Image (cartoon, coloured by chain):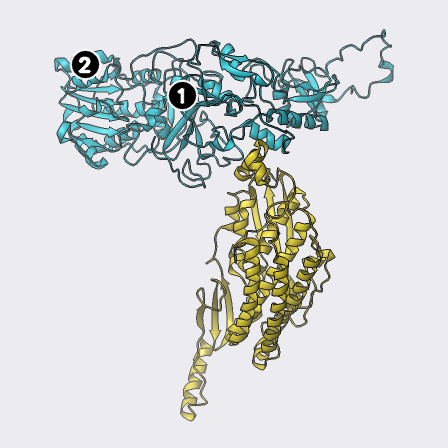
Chain colours: A yellow, B cyan
Amino acid sequence: MAHADERQTEDIEHEEASELEAHLNTKRMVINMGPSHPAMHGTVRMRVELEGETIVRADPEIGFLHRGFQKSCENVTWNQCLPYTDRLNYVSAIMNNFGFLKAVETLIGLEIPERAQYIRVLASELHRMQDHLTCVGAVGLELGGFSAFLYAIEARELIMDRVSELTGARLTTSFGRVGGLNRDLPEGWSERVSKSLDKIHELMVEVDGLLTNNRIFVDRMRGTGVISAQDALDFGFTGPCLRANGISYDVRKARPYWVYDRMKFDVPVGQNGDNYDRYLMRLEELKQSESIVRQCLRELPAGPVIVDDWRIALPPKAEVYGTIEGVISHFKLVMEGVPVPPGEVYDCTEAANGELGWYLVSDGSGRPYKVHVRAPGFAILSGVPRMIEGKMLADLIPTFDTINMIGGEVEQ
Amino acid sequence: MSESDGKKPTGDAQPPPPGAPTTHPAAQTGSSPSNPPAAAKPPAGPPGPPGKPAPRHPGFVTVTVDGKELVVKPGANMVDAVKEVGSEIPYYCYHPRLSIAANCRMCLVEVSNSPKLVPACQTPMAEGMVIQTKSARVHESQRAVMEFLLLNHPVDCAICDQAGECKLQDYYQRYDFRSSRLEGEKFMKAKRKVLGPLVVLDQERCILCTRCVRFMNEVAKEPQLGVFGRGSAELIDTFPGKQLDSNYSGNTVDICPVGALLNRDFRFRARSWFLSAAPSVCTGCSRGCSTFVDFMGQDTYRYRPRENEAINKSWMCDQGRLSYKSINQQRLAAPMLGRGEDRREATVPEALKSLAEQFKALAGTEGLAVLASPVASNEDLLASLAFARDALGVRSVYVGGRPDGAGDHYLMTPDKNPNRRGLEWVARSLDLSLRPFTELTQAITAGTVKALYAIGGEIPMDAAAAATAFSRLEYFVLQASNESPVTAQAHVLLPAAVHVEDEGTFTNLDGITQRFRRAYPPRADVKAHWAWAVHLAQEFGFPWAQVSAREVFREWAPRVAELATFDWDGAAPPVKTTRGINPLATGADGRPPGYREFGTPRVRGI
């Protein structure tokens, strides 16, 4: 207070001298960004304390999208958890579905058929592209480049069309079942995916050209939202946000699952840990994912898409309608769920934003005893104050974009 | 339905008494049998088959089950005994309270003293026997038995009442889980064959375990069922020209492990996985059989017997089984004031106020009498009779209740009131003398009783005749649960809860007091008798503040010599918890009882 008083006295003295050179009599201002704000992806609120345009303190406040996801899972069978997992990172729902199923399968000690593994990799990479396209497009949009957004969304729409052909849903896919997949690829789907990838490639050239070397864009991205490699590790960053710091950690390489060890792809790493590097990570991963999808389409083997075990997978419909064995198995699986042996497991996959981890506990019944999800976005959001405190308010927008926070998974 | 299975049979395996040798290392110090001193080696005996090994634990039989040592009493049944060490032997035909048939072959296990698999339910356990319940041979046998049992089983789960509580479903998914190798058509038998007033048989679903036949022969002692035919044509049926009309026929439905015998009363009314169960007591007669009340929302769907060694073993009679209907039908919902054309619905405070004014004027006069029903629980009677004595100043109580009916040779008694003994105890503790109902009607006719406060609407005579007598009353207050000709005569009619809607205790004819749990709360203005008594006492200015049956019991039961030592909390039967379809215990997680995540019940009323 004493300091403020001195400054006020000083102000008055100078007032007479020159009105223009006088200090602005500023005071700290607290503003709420969100929860309902177009740049605050989903409904997160950022309580920002400003001194002028400088952010003194930033406090992300979550919970507006809380759904009791983990507790809800305890009341339903393992397969019935899938629609809940859709709503975690809803931009790439399939990766949540498959990540959860993989953890359950690890708990059972189950290996799924090879074709199912290929399709899981394929669909995961398609949704990784969808997630990154949304992120890249949104960065352009929120920094004023609306055209880039339209190109990216056109590309995303192509993926959504392919995904809805595969799963029947644009957004909440609920795809896959414990032990494999609930349906095989539709007829002619692979060709359509190839064509879509060609078109997406063209569109990405446009987005790249519009943004990557755009002076205005680069000025707002480069050197903003910086976090050091050590801080990123300490906060528990994973995925593109960690790799932008030069740390090459990718679950697909570190602990390969499904058929990732057969795929040829690179894991891009950045240097500076700033917004621009995180943007470049996503741009490059789009290309790598496209390559993985094409490899999967080329190598896709024939065979079943779900295990042939009536304790885990529903029997074929002809058996259910025509035989007592089939109808009993169907009844027990639907009403009581897959009997997962008692035990606990931590298992993870590389989702679009980083390591998506599942801690599952089973008591041997058909329903989870405990489900906990390690959402990559949660750790990254907690690092946002470190990235922007002391920086300008305008930097908050690109920072919030490039960490790609998704309310659904952070708030569960 | 398998609720009564797997419980302790007579002569069941029991843990060794304290003092008996155990496998604990401390108990085995000294000479260890596995390392005997060389000098102590006995000389070689004469040639021939080896004699019986000396028991490791004298007085007990020591066997090895799946690599774990098990010490049991001689004569223990293997199926039950192996549960002590965590092993499980599946079975259909075995029932702890019935004779051994060993015909389902599901319990075949591998034992060290037989080259072939043996049925666990029938094989006595010998000293040193090594039992394997999980070996590949046993699993293959279980799978083969399941395949045979399902060979001619119809594809009925979707329309079968047993679905969800069917042992075929349970064991198929656990021990078979493969498709059938059957080629060609299934063998067809009669479906929907009505065996008697309460039981319908689907012969196609039957696995011929003969539990029902053995039950009728051995427990009900009314041989009405038999096995007819041979081979694929073998079937269960009643003897020619007879029907299954025993008063215990409902138990055959309970013990049927599959959907062959079904209850005609319950059939197609509810799916088993939508029902919750609460441990309760049957109010059909003074026997007080332990039951489960299966309910959904605020409706009761069926009673099932609950295991109770002291009273009903695993059984109950058909009359008691059907007595649940009065819980759902013709229930009173709101307080009523006035008689005949003046009758109107009233709010609870309005009814209490009007009642208290009248009672204050009548209290202590000769013209006021109190009628108590032995259908009410001990808690109801404790609070109501205490109110009658302290507030109304009566010295005697007339006894109402249901009229006597028929008894039978096993469980059912002629006295149809569940709590007559409790009423006697409570009245004695309050120095109230009990007077028969006939004296009341005489007194009303003579005009000496002008006002009556009735706790419970059950009357031990023809209801219409009683109504005529009650019509002479100048002031008639009735707390009743169901509509009847008597309720039409009341000047003040208060809706009362029934036993499934509240907690409490009943004392049966042998003086055994049993706790019952609440299944679901009563509807809006319906209250238990004790709650009406407490409310009325508060109108009188008494400092009564009991809000639960438990508090009522703790307040007044210590004055009743027979109930003083009763552990009300400790005697509460555990809430039924089953894994799988109904994983949530009734109200155990704080939700309203009967709640299921599958949605609210679509069937309202009966």
- Left/right placement of residue B434 relative to residue A244 reads left
Query: Residue under circle 1?
Result: B321
Question: In the image, what residue occupies the spot 31% across and 35% down?
Answer: B523
Task: Name the kind of residue labelled 1 in the image.
Answer: Arg
- Residue B441, disc: 2
- Where is residue A131? Give x, y as percent: 58, 63
Q: What is the CA distance from the residue labelled 2 to the residue labelled 1?
A: 32 Å
Q: Is residue A236 visible?
A: no
Q: Chain of mark 2?
A: B
- Where is residue B65? Give x, y as percent: 69, 24
Question: In the image, what residue occupies the spot 53% across and 34% down?
Answer: B579
B345, above or below B282, in the image: below
Nearer the observer, A370 or A240: A240
Nearer the observer, B598 or A58: B598
Q: Chain of mark 1?
A: B
Q: Earlier in the sequence, mark 2 or mark 1?
A: 1
- Give the crowd class for mark 1: few <14, some 14-19, many >=20 residues within 10 Å: many
A112, above or below A198, in the image: above
Tag 2 near tag 1, CB within 8 Å: no
Secondary structure beneath disc 2?
helix
In the image as oriented, which residue stretches furthest toward the top? B46
- Give the crowd class for mark 2: few <14, some 14-19, many >=20 residues within 10 Å: some
- Marks 2, 1 in one chain: yes
- Residue B382, disc: none
Q: Is residue A183 visible?
A: yes
Secondary structure beneath disc 1?
helix
- Left/right placement of residue B10 relative to residue B328 reads right
- Foreground label between 2 and 1: 1
Task: Name the kind of residue labelled 2 in the image.
Answer: Thr
Image quadrant where residue B275 sits: top left
B523, above or below A200, in the image: above
